[in-house]
Amino acid sequence: MIDPRDEPELPASAQTEITVLGAMQLDVAALRLATASLVPADFALDSHQRIFRVMAEMAADGEGVDLVTLMDGLARKSELDSIGGVPYLSFLTEGIPRNHNIEAYVRIVKDKSLLRQLFHVLSSSAALATDPDENATNVLQSVKNRLTELSATTFRSKTDRKVLVGAKDFVAGSVPQTEWAVEGLIQRGGNGIVVGDPGSAKSFSTLDLAHHLVAGLPWMGHAIPNRMKVAYVAREDHAGLTQQRALSLLRGYAGTDMDWQLSEVELNEYLYFNTRAQSETFSLQNEMDVIEMIDAFKTNGIEIAFFDVFRRLWEGDENDNKEVAKVLAVLTRIQTECSCSVALVHHLSKGEGGTIFQRIRGAGSIYGWREWAFGISVENPTDPPRDRIRKIVFETKAATPADAVYYAFEGTEEKVILAPCNPPAQSYKKHSRKKQDDEQEAIPWFQK
C-alpha cells in the first residue's frame, strides 16, 4: 500500500489527492466537480492518475462510481493490482470528512499540478537559454507561449459567483450608469471604429479627437468629462506626415481654450505616438509586438488607443471572418489587459450603396466588433478641395445616436483647425469612385 506520507520531491499533496479520490466515490457532486476541473496528469502519483482516469471515463459514460464499480472498471483495464488492489481503494474513503469542502481540495490538487508544470517549463527554458544555437527572442517566445497555455488551465471556482439570477432580483438591482469618454459618443472601455473614404480626413479628425480627449474639452459639441491619456498608433502614413498633422493642429489651437487646457498638462505624459520611426514593424499577429505594446500601454496608463489603420496592422484576408476574428480578439485582449478603450481607423469599400457603415471594408465581424462608430464623408466633393465640407455620423450601443455634425478645415497646412459649419448649400452629383480616387493628389496633405 502506498504511504501518503511519501511525498514526491516536486510540489504535491498525496493526502489531498487521496481525499479527492475518496470523495469522488462517495459523493456525486464531488465526482462532477473533480472531473470538470481536473485531468489525470494533475495527480502527482501514477496510481492516482490511473484511478482518476477510470472514474472520469465511467462518469462520462453515465456509470455510477462506488467501490464495487470502480474495482470492476480497473480490473477490466488490468490496472487493479498496479494501484494497490481492493485494499487501497477502500483506504481512499477512510477518514473522509463528513462535511468535506471538495472545491478546496480540488483547488489544492490543481495548484500543486500547476507548480509542477511551471517547474518543468522553467527547467526546459533554462536549457534552451544555454543552447548556443538559440537566440533570446525565440527562447522568450517559447516561454511566453508555454506560460500562456499553462495559465489557461488555472482552476476557476464553480461557486464564487452566480451564473443565473432570478428575474425579480435582476430588475430590482440598480442600473449602472454609462461612463462616457465623450458624452453620447464613446463609452469608457468601449471598442470603436472610425471609417471614411479616401480624402475624408479620417486620420486628421481622429488626431483632433485625441487632442480634445487630452484637453478635456468638448469635441464636435459633445462634452468630455475628464482628461484621458491617449495613444495614437499610426502605421499607414510615414512618421513625418503624422508629425506634421499633429503639429499643425497644435498651432491651430493657439489662442483658444484648447491651447490653454493643453498647456495645463505635460503633453508628453498624456499623448503618445507610435509610428514606423519608433518601431519599424508592428503586427497584431506577432506576439512579441503585442506584449511590447501592452507593456507600454500599462506603463503609461493609456486610457484610449487609436490604431490607424486597421489594414496595416496584420496580414491576411480581410474578407475572411475567421481570420479577422482572430485579429480582433488580439485587440480585445489589449483592451482587457490594459483596461482601456481601443479604436480602429478603417477604410470603406468602393461600393456606393447602403449607409456608410454598411460600406465598411472587409468581413462583417469588423463592424460587429465595434460598440461605437464614426463615419466620415465629404459632402461636396465637386467643390475645390479647400472648400469641402465633411459630415460625421455617429453610432453607439450605449445611447441613442447623436445628430450628424458638419465641419470644415480652416487655416493653412501649417496651422489648421476643424470648425463646425452648416451643410453644403447646394446638392451635388457624386463623383464616380474612380474620379474621386484620381483627385486625391489635389487634396492638401493635412486633409487626406
Image (cartoon, grey):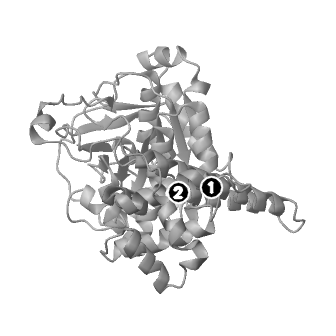
- Left or right position of 5 against 23: right
Q: Distance between the residues labelled 2 and 1?
A: 8 Å
User: Camera-side residue: 54 or 310?
Assistant: 54
Image quadrant in which the N terminus is located = bottom right
Say which of 197 and 25 sits in front.
Answer: 25
Residue 254 image position (x, y, % from top left): 49, 19
Given residues 224 and 37, the one toward you in this image is 37
Mark 2 closeness class: few <14, some 14–19, many ≥20 residues within 10 Å: many
Horizontal and vertical percent for residue 307?
49, 48
Q: Pointers 2 and 1 in contact (CB under 8 A)?
A: yes
Q: Name the residue under label 1.
A: 4
Image-based side of 24 in relation to 232, left or right: left
Q: In this view, does 377 lie to the left or right of 53?
A: left
What residue is disc 2 on?
18
- In this rendering, does residue 53 appear at all? yes
* Res 419 quadrant in image: top left
Residue at 43%, 28% (x, y): give it.
Answer: 213
- Identify residue type, mark 1: Pro
Q: Would residue 440 be seen by someone viewing this image from the given angle? A: no
Q: Position of residue 160 (x, y in %)?
A: 35, 41
